[in-house]
Image (tube, rainbow, N blue to C red):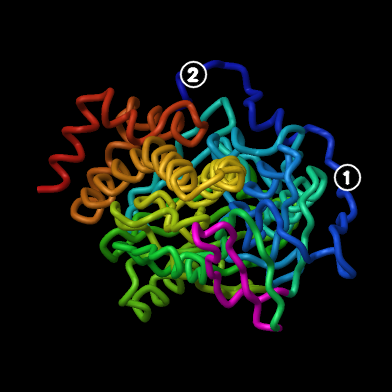
Amino acid sequence: MTDSGSSDPRSPLDAAASGQPSEPQPDRAGPGPDGLDGVWDVVVVGAGPAGASAAHAAASQGRRVLLLDKAEHPRYKTCGGGIIGPSRDSLPPDFRLPLQDRVHAVTFAYGGRFTRTRRSKRMLFGLVNRDEFDLRLVQAAKQAGAVLVTGVTVTGVEQRGGEHRTAVVTASDGRSFEARAVVGADGSASRIGRHVGVSFDQIDLGLEAEIPVPASVAADWAGRIHLDWGPLPGSYGWVFPKTESGSLTVGVISARGDGERTKQYLADYIRRLGLAGFPPSVESGHLTRCRAEDSPLSRGRVLVAGDAAGLLEPWTREGISYALRSGRLAGEWAVKVAEAGNAAGVRREALNYAFAIKAGLGVEMRAGKLMLTAFERRPYLFHAAVCLVAPAWRAFARTTQGHTTFAQVMRQYRAARKLASLASR
């Protein structure tokens, strides 16, 4: 069966992927012998999707922006690399997506059984390798005017002045960088998030393997992903094909605290898929941390975004779109914080940033947590719904394409609310 939307096979994501690549610009030096001293308008810590988006948003307004990262790009990142509609809509203008595959079909399974493949005429989402994707985001930030400095391990931040007129980011090599506003986008173990006081109420363990496969195997997976609702509460597995590079990204995620069973789930999943005979090129793991609802998003002149703020979708643990959207907002509001003339102005702009996050991403996260609670208790109901109920499949497809959100589905469809309520009992 197919999506009941437009029959036009070309989606906006296809259009985004066909644009012309932006040429990176050289780093621009500021005052001083190394070009890095003086007071920056905005210092962004972390050059992943959230940090690069923040740097792009602030630099696009003509501000002096410094982007810091401990690693050089491109670098490997544990991530399935799924680009859904909200991610596409938050990319810089003229950004060219380095797509490895375009997904039009999903095969659903429940514990390796009861499989069914659903298809859509319009592309559901695209798949990227994170090293290429992140590099292009950094290049876009540099083209907008941000200065990138890598090899910098940030150890903390302090705020100075009678009215906290500047913030100073310190590094392990003894250097420091002063700014009128700081954006922390340095991952889920963020030093900047620690300064702000970010707290989490959900921590999950994701395990992943990059598996190179022969061309014949890769062809079987082209344009299709696999989702398996797993044996542990709230767990699921995925296969994301990277057809252009001839590999499959296979991973599982579950609540932290049951690492051995999560490892066994991944091994069993790979075996059931018939992929155990292909040695992985990379095996990795990471923790995803989801913010508590009352967790702060700023402190003085310091804002946090993306994983550093615990912003991700609680049920699917999708984080790229949350990183791009929160990073862009953080960059825009960091400029306003930098321009604030006094402590009251700083507080007002920081509160406005928090309101913007909570009014959008916060509403979506609340719905996601309701979905996760229901899914943990009765995953088979979700499997039956998406496989057998046409409106449920359409809601899934439209969510990945960016036409709706889980929050809107829950608000607009009584059947969705009943399903979540029934599954939560």
The quarter of the displayed image where residue 287 is located: bottom left
Q: Quadrant of the N terminus?
A: top left
Question: What residue sits right under mark 1 in the picture?
Answer: 23
Q: Is residue 18 left or right of residue 304?
A: right
- At 66% from the left and 24% from the top, the residue drawn is 10
In the image, 262 versus 169, the foreground residue is 169
Q: Is residue 3 left or right of residue 82?
A: left
Does the segment drawn in magenta span residue 235? Answer: no
The amino acid at mark 2 is Gly
The amino acid at mark 1 is Glu
Q: From this viewpoint, is residue 83 visible?
A: no
Q: Residue furthest bottom?
A: 173
Question: What residue sits right under mark 2 in the picture?
Answer: 5
The quarter of the displayed image where residue 66 is located: bottom right
Compared with 280, 425 (above or below) is above
Magenta region, residue range: 152-173
Compared with 151, 12 (above or below) is above
Q: Residue furthest front?
A: 162
